[in-house]
Amino acid sequence: MITARLLLVMSVVTACSRKAPPPPPPAEPAKDAGVARPVVSDAAAPAPVYRTEKSGDHVSPEQLGHGKTFMVVSEAPLATKVGADILASGGNAVDAAIATAFALAVVFPAAGNLGGGGFAVVRVASGKAVALDFRETAPGAATADMYLDEKGTPTKGSLVGHRASGVPGAVAGMWALHGKLGKKPWKELVEPAIALARDGFIVDKRLAESIERHAPRLLEFATSAEIWVPKRIPRAAGSTVAIPLLAVALERIRDGGADGFYKGETAAAIATEMKAGGGLITGADLAGYKAEWREPLKVSYRGHSLFTMPPPSSGGIVVGMTAGMLRAVELGKLPWHGYEHVHQIVEVWRRAFAARNELLGDPAFVKNMPVAKLLAQPYLDKLAATITPTATSSQDIAPIIEGDHTTNLCVVDSTGMAVALTTTLNTSWGSGVTIHGFLMNNEMDDFTVKPGAANTFGLVQGVANKIEPGKRMLSSMSPTIVEDAKGELRLVVGGAGGPRIITAVWQTISNVIDFGTSIGVAIAWPRFHHQHLPDNVQIEAASIEQATDTKLRAAGYEVKHVTGRAFGVTNAILRVKDGWDGAADPRGGGAAIGD
């Protein structure tokens, strides 16, 4: 059995007590203490930035919200307002999520989309949770070796250009959500996005910076450059941009539902452009796409129940394995981000990501995928028992076989219905190809292009995630809803950032449950990350003290200090005594609005 193989390799690691050596003496931060605002950059820090003192909560006022009856949080203030307006006019949480998602496709084009896909976890007012998979699929003509050159070396074709795109699932996902759980008329949910695309919106500083940073890719494709880099000049902050072709595409969706995208003129435009550019998506691929309802994973942690996505998302599995392996560790009694805290979490993630990278894929293609085994407490106890007081090499955890942008939104309505929805183009601005005003994804890079070769996020994956026609690529998206011990809704959370979505979502949950923080602090506190391979601990600026860094290196860890969006962007809503607190991540530029 595959799971036995993983455990067999792991058995060479000496099992011992889970108690780590005494950590260095940094003081645990106060429950509502924050840290210096992260630098918005994807580059490695020129020098480590250590945590030296406590400071106040650094989430700006527009990124925090409070509501007695409802709350909406997304990565774009204009989109958040659209969702809040839907709730204020009598819509439910699903209606607001759909309208917000369509608005993000206009005002947050680096990740919001019609040409991508994603996942949603919904908790209805009765407490039942459901999950929707609208992940992209490989085109019918896709092959396992389509991104290898004659020498067997991966090319950039999985990231840039027409061949990088999977069949989009976003519109089908919104249509399926509305059909099962929506309340307001469909047309009312699409109309705000149409108005934004038709009448235009003001480019904010964050979007302008993103356009400038990604201008070289956008300039490769005339239809993208025309909108975002006209006359080879990136759109500036404060300028107004209208996208008439996108408005037309949205009008077809408004009037025809999913068929307005997957059939008819928009579908024909996609198929024609794909053929002209050497892409593989056909009209038949589009017409055949279906979103899939799935049973969410339910995981226990500290008396709470976590509802999260099953495969082809790997996020729920890794979150669940993390919770199970930490069952016997009282994190809240450890110095926050001291050696023992970081060590325990990193070793758990090392093991969970090893299983993720080798064993998981699309359940329709990977038969007998060991989901139940990976989440079984006896198995997780065995993995936890292999954690030693020092670093374990990732090569000892699982055999080496011879992963940047996404966006999340969270909604809670007056009835207690909650939605955590994550959607993506994969990396920022997707493949760079614009069709009818919207960008196409480059999700094909999330497949295993070549076993043993890292994708753009550094993930080294196995044959379970190989490219096959019609298959959904493995994902790290981790929309999660948390109930307390009484079965009442407590927390809604999700994030963006490739595999760092998983670790950012986990740290947000743990900050609330283990360390008792407010939601603003839970999101704002600096993070760390480990994903099995590459075998290093990535540390956000001001995340740890210098003494902890020294201790980690002495224990055998490779420590890499990184700044900015590399640590994900999370959004979350937390129940408080008089309603709901919402927070958008200060690493991004979102907003939380409640009433």
Image: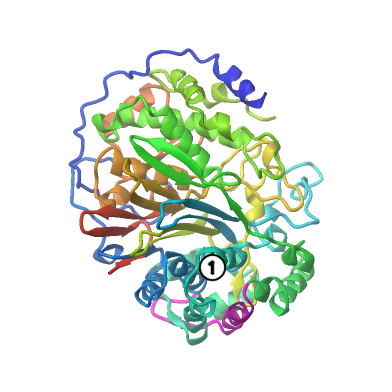
Residue drawn where x is 24% and y is 50% of the image? 518
Question: Would you place residue 418 above or below residue 316 in this image?
Answer: below
Q: Which amino acid is tagged 1? A: His
Position of the C terminus, as image quadrant, is bottom left
Position of the N terminus, as image quadrant, is top right
Outermost bottom residue: 199
Counting other residues with Cα less than 10 Å from the Cα at mark 1, is it few (<14), some (14-19), or many (20 or more)? some
Q: Secondary structure at mark 1?
A: helix
Question: Would you place residue 412 above or below residue 558 in this image?
Answer: below
Outermost front residue: 126
Q: How many marks?
A: 1
Q: Is 301 on the left or on the right of 233, as rendered? A: left
Whether residue 561 appears in this view of the structure is no
Residue drawn where x is 51% and y is 74% of the image? 106
Q: Which residues are magenta?
A: 234-257
Q: Is residue 256 magenta?
A: yes
